[in-house]
Image (cartoon, rainbow, N blue to C red):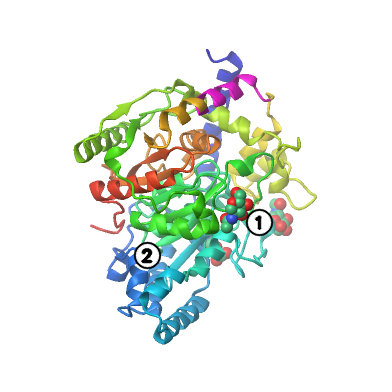
Amino acid sequence: MALSGLERAQVWLSKAVTGVLLILLRFLSRGSPAETGKKLPPVRDPLLLVPATQLAKKIRRKEVSSVEVVQAYINRIQEVNPFLNAVVKDRFASALQEAAQVDKLIEEETGGEEVLEDRLPLLGVPLSVKESFSLQGMPLTTGVVSRRGVVASVDAPPVALLKRAGAIPLGVTNTSELCMWFEAHNHLYGLTRNPYDLGRIPGGSSGGEASILAAAGAVIGVGSDIGGSIRMPCFFNGIFGHKTTPGVVSSDSQYPPTSGRQGEYLSSGPMCRYAQDLLPLLRVMAGANASMLSLDTKVDLKKLRFFSIPHDGGCVWTNPVSRELLDVQRRVVQRLEADLGVKVQQVALPRLRYSFQIWDTYMSLPDKDGKPPLPFSELMGEPGRPAWPFWELLKWMLGRSNHTMAAISLGLLEATRWSKTSAFVVQQKEELQRELDQLLGPDGVLLYPSHPRVAPPHHHPLLRPFDFAYTGILNILGLPVTQCPLGLGPEGLPLGLQVVAGRLQDHLTLAVAVHLEKAFGGWRDPGAE
Ligand SMILES: *[C@@H]1O[C@H](CO)[C@@H](O)[C@H](O)[C@H]1NC(C)=O
Ligand SMILES: *[C@@H]1O[C@H](CO)[C@@H](O)[C@H](O)[C@H]1NC(C)=O
Ligand SMILES: CC(=O)N[C@H]1CO[C@H](CO)[C@@H](O)[C@@H]1O
């Protein structure tokens, strides 16, 4: 179908408006110090280079104490956080006390190492948590200024499960305002930076989480993803992240709550530096629901069917995939074919062109009782007092808004929504779902770009607001995806791609991630010379 004139006008208008806004933003932020060129100190403590599951084993065997491990991570956070602004509230003193208790428990345990491994697989291992997850006693604001002082009174289910498995939270990390943007920036905690280039974004919404993990200030973390909020930050920061099949890991006790049909598209999952930690973390985070997945099934990669789609087929809203990302995906295809003796079939699904429209449409659908989603302006405002985006825009221009430009733009977009749900878009989604479900089946794996380009400079997402459609479409299609790092590009920025499987086949993408880590080297120290 040809693009309607109206839609074309919408695209150009939005690009023109964001262009003007970016120039304004540069003008307004001209006083902030330039961070480009400064480099993170390299990782010196070898404890920081041990996967979480191996750390847990060393702690159980008393080769290292939990206090030593927790202290090593506290030291690293204190070393790198002034550069990154990723951890926005710590609980170092409590964490050290908990670590001391762990060491005492291990000293007193008489049942042997296996008993501890079984009951407490992450005993003594430090954890970082995205601030939008309830973590008892810690702030729960998602960067909304009017929520300053809101403190979580419970633990969100996956956080509670990780703590019950023995993990020790060290703090909470920054997000985009209301978790609805791919730059971790808000007017409560400020801007988070990318450890590979401080002048670039860490992505969002789980940007603080990815930034501190990539900087080796954390080894495992927790993220949530409704349009790419785990995968984009993991891609921009060169670490692993898994968007679980929806409905497996609970999304309760997160802020903001979902409404309309959004709960069907939101997934929580692990973020980490080492691929081998993904599956054990997911097993813990899923609790009893882990039985919905085949996490104990040994995957024979040689028996899988592999597919590769190099780009979305030319969507007018998104930018073309850069040459370096097309190249790296080609190299992944070659490596899989050489290593496994499989044939990776290149396929085209032209309906991917409608990714953005599909995401946008389904995110605003009413729930099964006909109740529409909560308006974004209501979430931006104070209880009973929705924000007025036009007014916030004026205030923003005077440097006086409590909201980021990204949130104001989303509010404006909502206020000026021109079209009703289009039957055409719904039909494209249904067809695309059928095509992909058929293609993947129970043993298919798809390679797809994570984003059209590597981490852009701060604020630039405002110029390319729709590029998240590469990740967002897979939320609406309800498929599990593992984000895999693939080394650094010519500018020293992380490359990567999404590995997708059929619904509930999470074990396949996790197994491919372990293979790609071996083939491409996985995470790299951003401070290395
Ligand atoms: C920003 O938020 C604070 C706290 O909610 C409020 O007191 C202040 O008036 C707000 N500022 C503006 C410009 O809206
Ligand atoms: C298991 O899944 C159900 C349905 O998706 C959900 O309501 C429940 O909270 C999940 N349990 C856990 C432990 O995540
Ligand atoms: C750069 C920046 O604004 N950092 C802030 C992050 O949040 C903490 C906790 O509110 C503040 O103390 C920092 O100033």
Front-lying residue, 332 or 118: 118
Residue range in magenta is 421-433
Q: Is residue 248 magenta?
A: no
Mark positioned earlier in the residue sequence (2 or 1): 2
Q: Position of residue 37 (x, y in %)?
A: 33, 53
Q: Position of residue 155 (x, y in %)?
A: 60, 65
Mark 2 neighbour density, 10 Å: few (under 14) some (14–19) many (20 or more): many
Q: What residue type is disc 2 on? A: Ala
Q: Position of residue 131 (x, y in %)?
A: 56, 59
Question: Above or below — where is 523 with respect to 164?
Answer: above
Which quadrant of the view contains residue 322? top left
Q: Is residue 38 visible?
A: no
What is the secondary structure assignment of the residue under circle 2?
helix
Q: What residue type is disc 1 on? A: Val
Q: Position of residue 419 (x, y in %)?
A: 68, 23
Residue at left offset 40%, top offset 84%: 110
Q: CA distance from mark 2 to mark 1?
A: 34 Å
Q: Is residue 128 visible?
A: yes
What is the secondary structure assignment of the residue under circle 1?
helix
Dominant secondary structure of the residues highlighted in magenta in the image = helix
Beta carbon at label 1 within 8 Å of ligand 1: yes
Q: Residue furthest left?
A: 338
Residue at left offset 61%, top offset 17%: 6
Front-lying residue, 146 or 525: 525
415 horizontally vs 267: left or right:
right
Residue at left offset 30%, top offset 64%: 49
Mark 1 neighbour density, 10 Å: few (under 14) some (14–19) many (20 or more): some
According to the picture, the residue beneath numbered tag 2 turns out to be 52
Question: Above or below — where is 257 with respect to 88?
Answer: above
Question: Above or below — where is 428 with respect to 506?
Answer: above
According to the picture, the residue beneath numbered tag 1 turns out to be 145
